[in-house]
Image (spheres, helix red, strand yellow):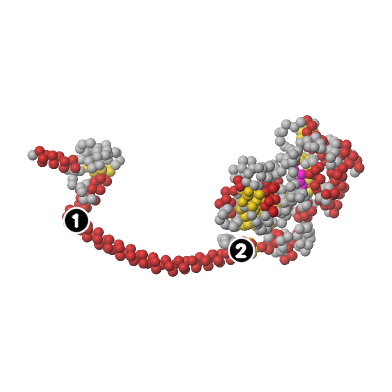
Amino acid sequence: MNILLLSISCAQGFIKFITPDELKNLTVFEEIATFSKVQLLPSYGKLAFADIDNCEIKGSYNENDVITIFQNDFDIECNVRDIAISAMHTGGGAFMLILRDDFDDYYYYYIGNYNGEGEELVYPYEGSDQINIFCLIIYGAEKNLKDYKKMSTIWVNYGYKTIPQESSPRIKYFMASDYSVDRIFFDELDKLDELYKLGYYENLYLYNFEPVFLYYDWNYDYEDEDCVNTNNTVYNISFCLYSNYYATGYERVMSTVIILNYYYSLPSFDFLYDFLSFLSDVYVYCENDYSEQCISEIVVNHGGIPNADPNILTIHHSEFYLTIPCYSINGVFIYTQGYLTEAYKIGIYMSGCKCYLDECDDDCTYYQLTDLTCNPKCNSTSCGYDNLVCLQENNCYIFTYGDDYCSESCLIDPDCDKKESSSNENLYFLLKIIIPAVGGVIIILAVLLVIYLIHSRRKLENIKKREGSTVELYEKFKKITFTDKVIFHGEAICLIDLKGISIGEKVVVIPECKHIIHYKCLKEMQDARSFQGCILCNQKKEIETNQV
């Protein structure tokens, strides 16, 4: 399994358990959604625990199924991206991987993919194998979910982290200093220039935007050609990147230094479009040339003065655990191209905003999606059923109806009526059969008990007549606890079972001769009517009689 290491601050997914009741308050420590489509509107589904063979999900599912597997279900050689793609091909609506509860480094997750040059392919969503379903990796739920794996239907509400709204949304662009992946947001030739188009159509200003340099914060043994030293008397820091096929780590860092210096030399109220045009030119004309000369020429062409002072890095860098090109809207990270415009619109706070979401119906505005009421225009799959509000009835989700589970908090669920009706019918049926049967058994037992009591009484009376009262026999001997202060004749050995008597045992000292025996032995002989007095004394009497 290939590994992509991510800071936990970048975990942008959420999952909420709807049923069964026992899971509603389950806390999931981490929820990561970084390698699939961005689910800006919440969705729902039921967990479908799938089988996996040779790193591939088996079976056939529908869009309401959240295909779920546990980390222990597959070999470490499997790539999670490939598993997610196979889940998509089965027809499922989402994919979820549950990490082991004993996973040591839960700050980092198995979700990534490497190329052969030490750089991460952080956009598996692009290309021919796009992952068009929402994917989520969670930590801290393995034990709870395994208990329900073959028991109840588990309904969940899932999606992307909510983007806060601000009157002037903030866009951060995190540069990996690798044009092959950074250009994904800008290159017009590939029609992936989201930021470029957004800056043109939305008339954004530079103060809405902040480019940030990403670098590895690990103590690797970099070569000198991989690092740039700031030589700052206060913050003397070395920023390092791996070398790739096109450039050394030093060249990659310095190209970003020139880009950052150019950006921060511009007036903050200039339009963002001009800078993004510059950045697009860099990615087009310097794609295979990371030299300072190539970048400097682009700066000059845009009316700027090239500046290679590396001190800019001490202010505008982000210490992620690896270089992940991405952008954020009001602090929410988005790693996949194709969602910037929609995410930006969500992040705008305007009274009575009539903004639309591209993936939602044109007649439904984002304002209607956030007013917590079900608007018919927004009640569709593409609009997330008005943020799932239209799927609620008295705080119950109607999509859970008919799954043969009655939630305690959702008693209007027809399953509850069915359960109650079924319970009443079953109870009536059982009572109809059991009551006569139980009555007959009780009568028979009562007759047998009377017969037994009569027989026992007669037998006892006969025994009393022959041998006297057992009560009198019991009263003759006193049960005591054996200690070293008990007065008796002979050795501390029971005359009946010939076993040694220990302190603390219950014993009887025969009044006439002071010999000692176990109380339990005496009682057994009394119950059997075989006690004829002290065995030792009787033996002596017999010997004396024979001698005479």
Q: Which residue is mark 2?
A: 401
Q: Position of residue 326 (x, y in %)?
A: 76, 46
* Among numbered discs 2 and 1, the one appearing first in the sequence: 2
Toward the front, the furthest residue is: 54
State left or right for residue 465 relative to residue 159: left
Q: Nearer the viewer, residue 353 or 378?
A: 378
Q: Position of residue 403 (x, y in %)?
A: 59, 61
Q: Answer yes or no: is residue 202 visible.
A: yes
Residue drawn at point x = 44 percent, y = 69 percent: 432
Q: Which residue is mark 1?
A: 464
Q: Position of residue 494 (x, y in %)?
A: 24, 40
Q: Nearer the viewer, residue 410 or 97?
A: 97
Q: Answer yes or no: is residue 395 visible.
A: no
Specify few, some or many for label 1: CA neighbours under 10 Å numbering under 14, 14-19, or 20 or more: few
Q: Is residue 425 above or below residue 196?
A: below
The main secondary structure of the magenta stretch is: loop
Q: Which residues are magenta?
A: 323-327
Q: Three-letter amino acid code at disc 1?
A: Lys
State left or right for residue 64 relative to residue 249: left
Secondary structure beneath label 1: helix
Q: Three-letter amino acid code at disc 2?
A: Tyr
